[in-house]
Amino acid sequence: MLEFRFPAYSLTLACIICMAGAALAQDDAPSLKNTAAASPLANPRPGPPPRLPSDSGQVWQEYDLKPYTKELAKVDRPHQAIIDWVLRETGSDAWFTDPFGFINADRETLRVYHNRQMHQVVKGVYERFVNGTTEPQLFGLRIMAVGNANWRTRAHSLVTTVQAQSPGVQAFLMSKENAALLMALLRGRSDYREISALDMVVHNGQAQTFQQVRSRNFIDNYRVAAGAWPPYMPTTAEITEGYQLQLSPLMSLDGKSVDLVIKCNIDQVEKLNKVNLELPLQNGQVFPGQINVPQIASWRLHERFRWPSEQVLLLSCGVVAAPQGQANATLLGQGTGLLGLDRLISSTGSRADALLMIEYRGNANARLSPGQPPATERVATPNPLSRGRY
C-alpha cells in the first residue's frame, strides 16, 4: 500500500480519498435536493395552467361529433378518422410550429386551438363528416394484372389521364360505360389476370384494410451442436411476403366527388439465393452447409386522389412485383383467400402491370338484396363472379 509520511503523522492514500469523497457528498447533498425541488416534473405547480399564447389570433373552438359517431357504435375510435383527415388538409407541421395551436378529439367533441384561418380548414373537414352522409357507402374494388403494358394502345381513347405524385404510378378517369368497355378489352387478352373483385362497405372517412400475407422459412445460419453428428445444426429465419391495401374514402357534402387515400404495400420474395459454406471440423476437414439469402422485391404506394363520384378511377402501378402467379396444387394455390395470394405473389418472381379500379356505387343499404344483413354488419366480400377462385 502506498503511504505518505509526514513528520508528525502518516495517512494512507486510501484514507485521504475516502475522507475527500465523504466531504464532497456532504457538500453536494443540499444542491441535489434543491435541483430536485426546482424540477417541474418532480413538483408540479398547483393551480390553473398558464395562459395560452394568442399573439396570432388563436381562439378555442369545440365541435360536436355526436351526430357522426353515434352511427358508428361498433367502430373503435371513429373520431381518429377526423383527426387524420384534418392533418391531411393542414399538414402536421401546422400543429407543431408557430403559431401555437393544438387539436384533440374524443367520441363526442373535437377541440381545436388555433387561428381563424386554420379553423376554417378544420370546419370544412368537420362538416363533411357531420353534415355529410352518415350511411355506409359501397365501393367496387377490382385488382388486376396485365403481363404487357401495351394494353394502353387500345384503352387510350377510353380514359383521361390525371396527375399522380408517386413515381411510376399513372391515374386515369373514365365513365362507367367506358370502364365496362375497358374490362371487355382486358378480359380478351391472354396475359390478363383478375386478382380480386370485391365490394367494400365503409363509413364516410373511415379506413378499410385488406391483406393477404404468408411466411416463408429459410436456413440463414448454422450453430455448433456439441456431442452430435453432424456437429452443426441449421438455424432458420422467417420472412413475410404478401399484399396489404388500405383505403379511406371521404365524400363531399353534395356527394358529387370522392377523396380517397390509398396505401398499398407489396413484398415479394423473388428467390432464395443459395450460398455454400465450409464449416470446420476437429480433424481438419470441413463440413458442407448451405444457407439462403432472400432476394426481395418491394413496392409502396401512399397517395390521395379526388375525382367525380359518377366516374371510375383506374390506377396503373407500373410493372412491379407481379400479381400474376399461376394456380398450383398446394393449399395456398386453391385461391381461397380474400385476395387470392397465390395469384398475387408469383413463385417465379415475375413482373406485371398492376391495375387497381375503384368505383363508387352509392349508399350500401340501398343496394342490399332483401334478407341481407345491414351494411354496417358486413365486411368486404369477394365478387360472386369469382366462383371462389380469387
Image: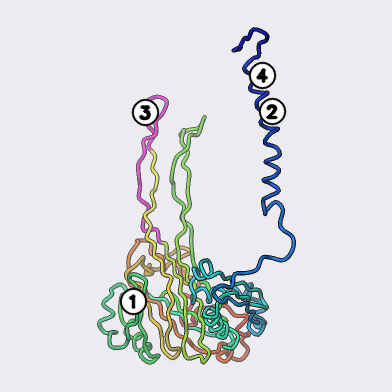
Q: CA distance from mark 2 to mark 4?
A: 11 Å
Left or right: residue 247 compared with residue 150: right
Q: Which mark, residue 285?
A: 3
Q: Secondary structure at mark 1?
A: strand
The residue that label 2 is drawn on is 22
Which percent across, then down, holds residue 183?
Answer: 36, 84
* Nearer the camera: disc 3 or disc 2: 2
Foreground mark, 4 or 1? 4
Q: Which residues are magenta?
A: 268-288
- Determine the secondary structure under disc 2: helix
Please give the residue where the numbered disc 1 appears in the rendered image. 170
Q: Is residue 187 visible?
A: no
Q: Earlier in the sequence, mark 2 or mark 1?
A: 2
Instruction: State left or right for residue 164 relative to residue 58.
Output: left
Is residue 161 among what the camera can see? yes
Q: Determine crowd level at label 1: few under 14, some 14-19, many 20+ residues with C-alpha closer than 10 A.
A: some
Instruction: Identify the mark nearer the N-term, 1 or 3.
Output: 1
In the image, farthest residue toward the top: 7
Q: Residue 367 location, x and y as percent?
A: 55, 90
Which residue carries the number 4 mark?
15
What's the residue type where badge 4 is placed?
Answer: Cys
Which amino acid type is marked by label 3? Gln
- Mark 4 and mark 3 lie on one chain; the one further toward the N terminus is 4
- Evaluate if marks 2 and 1 touch, with contact meaning CB atoms under 8 Å apart: no
Distance CA(mark 1)–CA(mark 3): 58 Å
Q: Residues within 10 Å of mark 3 (few under 14, many from 20)?
A: few
